[in-house]
Amino acid sequence: MLTIKFEPFQTTISPQFWSDLREYKLHHAKLLSDKLLIKGRFSPGRQIQLRSSNTSSTSQEKAQKPSTLKPRFNLEFILSAQRNLLSSTSQGTLEILDSLYKENSQDCTFGLLYNYNTIEEFKSIDRNALLKEYTALIYSHIKSKKQQTNPLVLSLFILTTFADLKRFKFYYWAAYPSIVETIPNSVAPNSSPNIASQTYPISSKFGPLGLLCLSKEYQEFSKSHPSDCLIFSLTYSSHSPDNISCFIDPSGSQTVAGWILRNILVWARSTFANQKISVLCYKDVNSFALFQPDSQSFPENSFQSILYEIPNDIQVSESYQSVGWERNLAGKLLPKLSSLEASMDPLMLASSSLGLNLQLMKWRLAPSLDLSVIASTKCLLLGSGTLGCNVARLLLGWGITDITFVDNGSVSYSNPPRQPLFNFSDVGKPKAICASENMKSIFPAINSNGIQLSIAMPGHHVAKQNEESVLADCEKLDSLIQSHDVIFLLTDSREGRWLPTVMGAVYKKLVICVALGFDSFVVMRHGPPHQESESPSILETTSHSDQTVSCPRLGCYFCNDIVAPLDSLSNRSLDQQCTVTRPGLAPISAGIAVELMTSILQHSKGIYADPVLPENYPKKSETLSSSNDNSQAVTSVLTYDKPIPHQIRGFLGDFQQHIVLGNSYDKCTACSDTIINAYKNRKINNFLLCAFNNIKQSAPEGEIKVDSQELEDEANFNYLEWLTGLSELHRKTDMLDVDDFLVSSDSDSSEIKDIGAESDGKDDAFNF
């Protein structure tokens, strides 16, 4: 009599499984810890031949020595439709396993995954209760179904995990619930029902004809399942008095059976009461596949499968024990740890870590946050100084990896302390290129480009020999703005923002302007023109196209000006040439600018999002949506279509911040329809050179022509002011001022004369 020994599984989990679990937890489950279905596979047990490394061994001893492989149990995720069956249907575990079995899902076995949110939850699980719950499930299924027992139930397994997503560490503990029946002490004290009366190697039990039949049966079985299928097949034959049950045994040892035989024996004793039980353990599928029935003889050890004959006339107790928790490598009942950080590609590790904090926002705070829209945004940073460096780092924090820097300066010794993308070793390098390279050193997966480019400015004269190169730079800037989604105006000078503002209005881009004073700042978004005939821009929502014209067009950086931008860099002292601001101003304003952009990207109206109304704004306007009020502005705009500020002005002197609203100006020198049309026809009307040099040039037929009689002083001529009508506005305003002065002078003279008459000349102070 031989007591059967059972070899437990060694759970093998591939990095792909942990990657799938991380993806599921981060993007789908989030804070939920519902159990879900996963797959498990195990291979037939086998032995391998090893050569002896002992140099003193004889040639025969050096021949191959058999070595038994441990039974491995491999886990993998399944399709979401099956994975979420437990939570998406009212069916229980047994019903779901029955349906999967009927669908011929027999190339694997199924188990339950419990993934916990904290390591404390993982440690505090009542694992004994969990194991008893599922052994009771298996036992009740065996007793109720018997011959219709589902093999998937007998091989059910459990996996408890905690995923440390930040450190790529995964704690896990697997269990293979098994029933251990006991014999009452009154029948046979300290006895086990798992005793085999006979153990036969398969080659001694079956002759060549029997092996041929088994080989054919296996070949039929392998037609619907791969030759390396890992599920055991439990069957019984009504024609055989021996009632042979068969399964694929994962243990490679000829003296030890696989762990799943425990539940099979419970099933067999319940199904074939008071009958002898024969269990065939398939251990060498390859031998069956290669078996040649023509051979008259074969080595006895060519087949490793074992046939157990077990008596079934022993009374077993109704009570049973539950076993199955896997031991760790030290042989202790403790969980295992799988750390992927050391084995992962550093670039992939950095990419995964970048999106971790962003995805965590969706767990509680912003469930509807669309990170894909943000991540796919292409940003153009005009200016790579203090503002440009801070904006770039914050964009990267939001997961934006397509950033282009534009600047024409070089890193100076004063830059590294205030501009976080530069080091002392970068002094003398081109700013844009250096900033781009340093961004790649921070995050190698970024698509960052640096372009050394000068932005032509109105009021800055362009020499004749430089006209061609300047216009080429303008066209290059035009191409850059067209190929990007968001434009940040971060230049030092005011007039340096003019040309990008014009281009942004022409192509209806999201333009965000940031300007600094000594202790004040302004962050604003430019309002795009409403042109319904054109297709919506990348930031618009087409479903709201009928609402984009409901809000007055917002102004740009130049809409409040009544004069055109001029040269503000010449004839300046040192303190006026350098950017003299409080050091904390740039990071604050850069943060507001990036968050403003993010809010607009999440809004359903995109760049046409309604603005927040200041407290003193007239409420009688009917062009704004009725939902626009100050109370709504407090709610997070990351998840709701609430009003978004047009301008944010901050003052560090008294640590206050104000929201300002400014409509567009029809005579604006940067975004008015006149300027937009002139820019579109720039190759015909020489618009750009006229704006840069303030020169008079005849306009094409049908456009306004220069009338020199309207200009009192040719030296004060400004092309942009003339083109937009600001010059005419100035002239009329000056005439009104003169008339007002004349009226005031006449009135004052009469009053003085009256006073003088009353004094009768006695007071010399009134004698004129």
Image: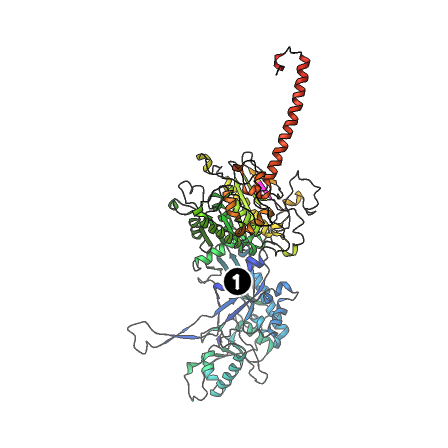
Image quarter where the C terminus lies is top right
| Residue situated furthest front in the rendering | 709
Check the image and report above or below for 502 versus 228. above
| Residue situated furthest top in the rendering | 762
Q: Position of residue 513 (x, y in %)?
A: 54, 45
Specify whether 474 is left or right of 529: left
Residue occupying the point 44% across, 35% down: 574
Closer to us: 187 or 445: 445
Closer to us: 627 or 515: 515
Check the image and report above or below for 494 versus 283. above
Q: Is disc 1 placed on a helix, strand or loop?
A: helix
Q: Position of residue 82 (x, y in %)?
A: 59, 67
Overall secondary structure of the magenta stretch?
loop
Whether residue 100 appears in this view of the structure is: yes
**What residue is shown with label 1?**
20
Closer to us: 279 or 80: 80
Q: Amino acid at mark 1?
A: Asp
Colour scheme of the picture: rainbow
Check the image and report above or below for 733 versus 280. above
Specify whether 620 is left or right of 526: right
Closer to us: 48 or 689: 689
Q: Position of residue 545 (x, y in %)?
A: 65, 54
Residue occupying the point 42% across, 49% down: 434
Residue 645, magenta (yes or no): yes
Whether residue 118 appears in this view of the structure is: no
Residue 457, magenta (yes or no): no
Q: Which residues are magenta?
A: 641-648
Q: Position of residue 476 (x, y in %)?
A: 48, 52
